[in-house]
Image (spheres, rainbow, N blue to C red):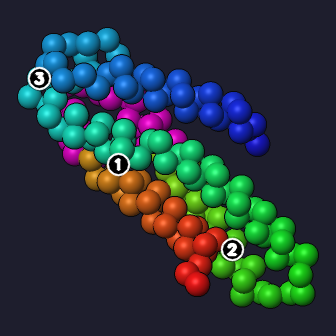
Amino acid sequence: MINQSICQFFVIILLGAFASCSGKSNEAASGIRGAVPNELQPLYEEILAVHDEVMPELNTITSLQEQMKNKLDELRGTPANTEALKEANRILGDLNKAENAMWSWMHNFSKLDSIPDGEKSAFLEVEKMSVNSMKELMLSSIEQAKAYLNPPL
């Protein structure tokens, strides 16, 4: 398993790389942005805006994963409550899926510069659906974990 510090380092590097590509100019820039034809720039920027919105939530997910692991340790130390353990494991699993979805999406999206221009529109349309699904997964897993860890009184 990758050390949390290494993961955070890569998140910072990837965030910096994406941020450097998200300017408002339609001129070709270095990196992926320069590989997008002008007519696809609005779609590209819409996709990147969703990414940029949820990327910082990886820190929230990491924090919630740790809290859920602690909760699982606590539950394992008490008389067996199978349903509580199942629920905590499910929520932790959803957080892990959300984190993996972000990494997977970023990896796939980085292939944009190798896609032939004639196929970029279709690629970006698929990525738009994918980034929105990833966003929903991230936000819903965060919401579930927060509700579980901080139930209303």
For marks 3 and 1 on the same chain, the one whose residue lies earlier in the sequence: 3
Q: How many marks?
A: 3
Q: Which residues are magenta?
A: 103-127
Give the residue type at disc 1. Answer: Val
Instruction: Give residue 142's position: percent from left, percent from top.
Output: 52, 62
Amino acid at the residue labelled 3: Asn
Q: Is residue 51 left or right of residue 60?
A: left
Query: Which of disc 2 and disc 3 is earlier in sequence?
Result: 3
Q: Quadrant of residue 28?
A: top left
Q: Is residue 84 above or below residue 56?
A: below
Q: Residues within 10 Å of mark 3 (few under 14, many from 20)?
A: few
Q: Which residue is mark 1?
A: 131
Are the two marked residues, 3 and 1, in contact with CB atoms closer than 8 angstroms?
no
Under circle 3, the secondary element is helix
Q: Residue at x 49, y 28 (%)?
A: 14
Residue 76: x and y in percent read 86, 75
Q: Residue furthest front?
A: 153
Measured as percent of width and height from the top left, residue 30 is found at 31, 11
Relative to residue 78, is residue 81 drawn left or right? left
Look at mark 2 in the image and give the residue it sits on: 88
Label 1: state its secondary structure: helix
Mark yes or no: residue 1 visible: yes
- Relative to 140, residue 117 above or below: above
The residue at 43%/22% (across/down) is: 17
> Which quarter of the rendering shows the N terminus?
top right
Q: Which residue is mark 3?
A: 38
* Sequence-wise first label, 1 or 2: 2
Q: Is residue 62 left or right of 5 when viewed as pictured?
A: left
Residue 18 on the magenta segment: no
